[in-house]
Structures are given as C-alpha cells and as structure tokens.
Image: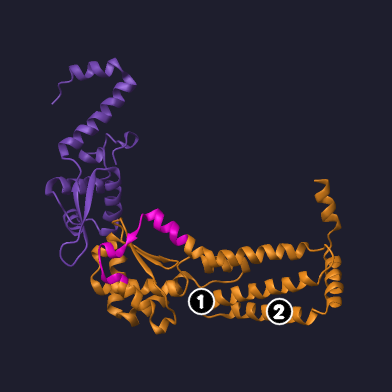
Chain colours: A purple, B orange
Amino acid sequence: MVKLDRINLSNEGLTKFFSPIEAQIMTVLWENGECTTPDITERTGIPLSSVAGTLDRLVKAGYAKRTVDRSGQRVRYLYSASESMDSTANSITRKVLDSLVDTFGKVAIENFHTYNKK
Amino acid sequence: MAGLAGHWEMFSISNEIGCYVTCISDSGMLPWLLASLFMALLLFVSYLNAKTPGSRISSFIAAQLCMLASIGIAVSSMHCSRMLTIEIYTAYAGLSTLAALLLPRVYQRVLIGRHMARPIAEIMEWPQAFANKVGNNSNLNSSGTLDVYYYDSAIPRAFASGKAIFLSIGLIEIMDMDELKAILAHEVWHLRHRTGTPILRNLSMITFTRNCTGSELERLADTFAAKTVSRNAVESARAKLS
C-alpha cells in the first residue's frame, strides 16, 4: 500500500508504491472498470486465498471500493477503483513531493523547477 | 501487612478440618453434607468421562451446583470464623459457573461488534430458515432460534459463537447453495454442541482436564453436515476453502 516508509524506488512500475498483488489488482480495476472476485482472480492469475485479503486491504485503504450485488440468485461483490489511475498517480506524487519539501525545503523546490528529464 | 501476616500465621489446614468436623457433627447436618459431596464427586467423574461437549458442560455445572449446596450446608452448620477455605472455593465455584453460563452470549455480542455483522436476512432469505430447521432437528436434541449474520469481508470464512453463525460475503459469493447449506449445518453442529466459544477450553483449564482437539470437533461437525446435506457438498466446500 502507498505508505512513504514502504516506497521502494528500486522496484519496477507500480510495485514501487504497491505490493505486487496490489499492483496487479489495481491494474485490473483501472483497465476493466467494475469486476467480480472471480474476474479478478482470472485476470490476475492469483489464487483467491491471496486475492481476498488484498482486496479487503485495498478497500480499507480507499484505493478500491465495492458494493454488494444481489441481482439474480447470487450475492456477490462488485469491485471498482475508487479513483482513476491519473488521480491516484496525482495523490501519490503529492505525497512524495510533500515529503521531499518537508525534508529538503528550497533545494527540493529548486530541483522541481530545473527538472526536465524525460 | 502485619495484620495479614498474622492472619496467615493463624491459618492451618488441620485446625480448619478439626473445626468443620466438630461443628458439622454437632449440627446433625453431616448426612446431608456427605450426600451432597458424594453427588458432586459422581458428577465430576461423569464430567471427566463425558463423550459429548454438551454433557461435559452440563455435568460440570451440576457438579459445581452440588458443591455450592455442600458449602451452603457447611456454612449453616458452623459457628466459628475459620471459613477461609470455604470462601475461596465459593468464589471459585461462583465465578467459574457464571463464566460458563455467560461467556457464549458475551462473546457473541463482541463478535457482532468487532465484525459489524448484520442479519443475513438483509441479503438472503433462506439461510436463516435453513439454520433454524437444522438447529431444531431431533438428531441434535435441541430447540430455540439461531441467528445467522453476514459481515463485510472478501476472505471466505464461517464461524459460530453463542447462538449465532457468522458468514463473510467472500464465503457467500464463492459457494453454491448446497455448499452453503453444508457450511451452515457444520456451524449449527458446533453451536448445538457448545463448541463455538472458548467454554470447553476454559473448563479444561479450570479443571486441569483434557478437551477434544479442534480436528476431532471439525470431523464430527462435517459428519453431521454430510448427513444433513450431502458428502459431496461438504467436500466441495472444503476444497474451495483450502
């Protein structure tokens, strides 16, 4: 989950900020919109025993949301991302920038102004 | 502290026994006291040999009540103040019996609050009716209502305590109707045999005796669920949870 003390800059892609399972689930939710639990296990290829606890954590942390669907004979969860990928990227960036400015002050801000890589 | 040390210096088991014998012999209550103690002993032996959790609990509580009756007889017969052992045992018997009677209900309320559980009827109708039907089954020799609750979690889990069964939505969504029935029957068995709370484990600790192991209880609950629903439903539910 995106906690500043858990950010690992040496990892690839979203796993810098999420655990590998969280990153896979969030990618599925961002790409597919509303999903059931079997949709998520099928698309990530991760067994239910690992997905279930991670889904609870993502919902509790506010990155995913779920509703209970009672249409038809079955009761099931419908999951979706709480925010778009861009909005989530925004809030992660904001957290990291706040932390850098808190720690390094003007030096951090000067670096943002001169930053033009990529 | 000096007063307390003085009290312990004065206390002696042989003096206590001498005091009991003199006072109770003089009062004419000795036959009643012996009969009550003998009943307590018999009930405690039957508690140690009980085959089912229900009979273990009932024989333990009955033994405690006989001991309380014995204490009542002893207290009414005595005319001196050497009552320390009686006071200690009365406190132990009273508190342990109260805990044995109240623990399941208290624990159930704690679980409802902790999981923010809601009545299952809010999302499904049949599980409550099915649990009541199985719970009043003559094979279980019991009656009364059981409450079925659901709670918000993707982790597939079912458990029982007091007079309530708890199912997670994660469990409900992956099981078909027969598998859910098998799980409910399994949990009803636990409730009707009073094994869903720490009560038997507590009794075992209080009396320094052995309780059934968890796997034995699970096997017995599965056997009941297989008889009530089907062996296939039990096995496929277990496979989904493993």
Residue drawn where x is 66% and y is 81% of the image? B42
Neighbours of disc 2 within 10 Å: few (<14), some (14-19), many (20+)? many
Residue A82 or residue B31, whichever sits in front: B31
Residue, disc 2: B36
Q: Main secondary structure of the magenta part?
A: helix
Rendering coords of residue A12 (x, y %) = 22, 39
Under tag 1, what secondary structure? helix
Left or right: A64, with A103 as reference point = left
B201 left or right of A3 in image: right
Q: Quadrant of residue B231?
A: bottom left
Residue name at image x 77 percent, y 72 percent:
B74
Secondary structure beneath dot 2 equals helix
Q: Nearer the viewer, mark 2 or mark 1?
A: 2
> In the picture, which quadrant includes the N terminus of chain A?
top left
Residue B163 part of the magenta segment: no
Amino acid marked by disc 2 = Ser
Magenta stretch: includes residue B113:
yes
Question: What's under tag 1, amino acid-wise?
Answer: Gly
In the image, what residue occupies the spot 84% across and 62% down? B12
Query: Magenta part of the protein: which range?
Result: B107-128
Considering depth in this image, is A15 or B100 the residue closer to the camera? B100
* Quadrant location, the C terminus of chain A: top left
Task: Measure the alpha-carbon separation of dots 2 and 1.
Answer: 23 Å
* Residue B54's disc number: 1
Q: Quadrant of residue A5?
A: top left
Q: Are marks 2 and 1 on the same chain?
A: yes
Asked whether, in this view, residue B131 is left or right of residue B140, the answer is: left
Can residue B219 be seen at all in this image of the molecule? no
Q: Is residue A48 above or below residue B184?
A: above
Report the front residue among B90 and B172: B90
Q: Check whether the beta carbons of the residues at disc 2 and disc 1 lie within 8 A of each other.
A: no
Residue A17's spot in the image, x, y percent?
A: 26, 38
